[in-house]
Amino acid sequence: MKNYTLVAPCFFGMEKILAREIKNLGFEIIKTEDGRITYKTDEDGIAKSNLWLRCAERVHLKVAEFEAKSFDDLYENTKRIDWSTYIPYGAEFPISKASSIKSKLHSTPDVQSIVKKAIVDSLKKKYMETGMLKEDKEKYPIFVFIHKDKVVITVDTTGDALHKRGYREKANKAPIRETLAAGLVYLTPWRPGRILVDPMCGSGTILIEAAMMGLNMAPGLNREFISEKWRTYDKKIWWEERKKAFEAIDESVKFKLRGYDIDPESVEIARENAEIAGVSDYIDFEVGDATKFESDDEYGFIITNPPYGERLEEKESIQLLYKELGYAFKRLNNWSYYLITSFEEFEYEFGREADRKRKLYNGMLKTYYYQYVGPRPPKAING
Ligand SMILES: C[S@@+](CC[C@H](N)C(=O)[O-])C[C@H]1O[C@@H](n2cnc3c(N)ncnc32)[C@H](O)[C@@H]1O
């Protein structure tokens, strides 16, 4: 049976949550670095990781790691690899991305062309090809990552990034990434059966991710992955893992989530997205003002991604919004609430210091996830 070393990149701040997901799939973590996790799997690892990881941005197959302080080092070490075990005859292999941090080889376009040349030369020798290598079959995108002169070369097994689940055909102005939305839910003790509300739901991403988690629905079921077309990866594994993922959906779990937004168009978009995701029976979306949110229920959860007020002219209205949210949420009995924002003085405006706060990057934007943790319900309510 084959073993793979895979590398899963993620947003900064999400490493621990992603590591837990990887362990839960039964794989062994080798290394956790800022924004990426390296782990070992057996042969089903590529299919399982792509189908199931909610917080990873991609899944890469690690091919090599070596030191390179010159372009000669880079060329020789890359050419030495038997690329024919990864790239079959006729396949396309663009060097999709190169990045270099604190390293002698800092010109990434040069890194890309040297790596391309080395792989071409290695493959030509193996396939005894003297002319141009044909590249008209399935795709194996190559990624090169250099950090402190250490080069890691990988092949992307994912294609379109993992946050593209296939359900968000439309989005409102500032949608949160699906991978981050899933992470926000993971960082709370919410479980199906407990009340969950997003009172500023926009295109509905947080609730759709929560519903998929509640149903044990794999996030990758609605889409395809580039490695499904590979000749070098047994298609049977993909079929089996897809079948298992379908069978794993647990519709016996009963729960209903609630989403509100002040903007009717966003509510419409959220409904459509939930429909495409196959979770519309589990979420009610309504137009509503979060600052007027009230509930007679107890022990509920709010997870929300309010506007951040990034533009200067929005500052005053954001301060007012956060103040009003602070008043509204304080009236709720025994609730827990979780808000993500880049607004620096959020706690001051909201009127309460968070029990916990966690630094997370929403793309390149530094945000904090403010966590106000309410009491646990008595056993009977907890179900
Ligand atoms: C950053 S967006 C949320 C994006 C959402 N997480 C998504 O994935 O699309 C903030 C949302 O808050 C809504 N909003 C702003 N003020 C509101 C209020 N007082 N009540 C309800 N929604 C509000 C906006 O219409 C916008 O859709």
Image: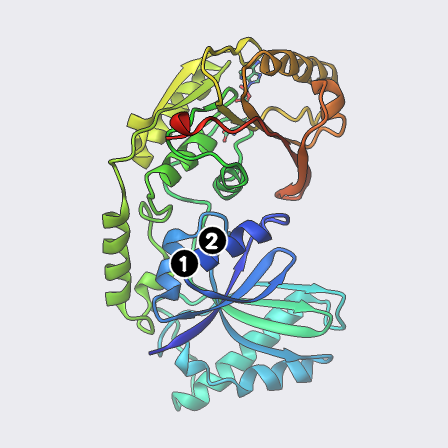
Residue 193 visible (yes or no): yes
Q: Relative to residue 35, is residue 244 drawn left or right?
A: left
Q: Circle 2 sits on which residue? A: 21
Q: Amino acid at mark 1?
A: Leu
Could you tell me which secondary element the residue under label 2 belongs to? helix
Vertical relation: 297 (above or below) 229: above
Vertical relation: 237 (above or below) 162: below
Could you tell me which secondary element the residue under label 1 belongs to? loop
What residue is rendered at 24% in x and 36% in y? 252
123 or 185, which is in the foreground?
185
Q: Amino acid at mark 2?
A: Glu
Vertical relation: 189 (above or below) 324: below
Instruction: Work out which quarter of the rendered image holds the N terminus and state it.
Output: bottom left
Q: Relative to residue 2, is residue 38 drawn left or right?
A: right
Return the mark for residue 138.
Answer: none
Residue 305, image quadrant: top right
Q: Circle 1 sits on which residue? A: 25
Spot occupied by residue 366 in the image (x, y as percentages of width and height): 69, 40
What residue is rendered at 69% in x and 79% in y? 68
What residue is rendered at 56% in x and 61% in y? 37
How packed mark 2 is, by other alpha carbons closer than 10 Å (few <14, some 14-19, many 20 or more), is: some
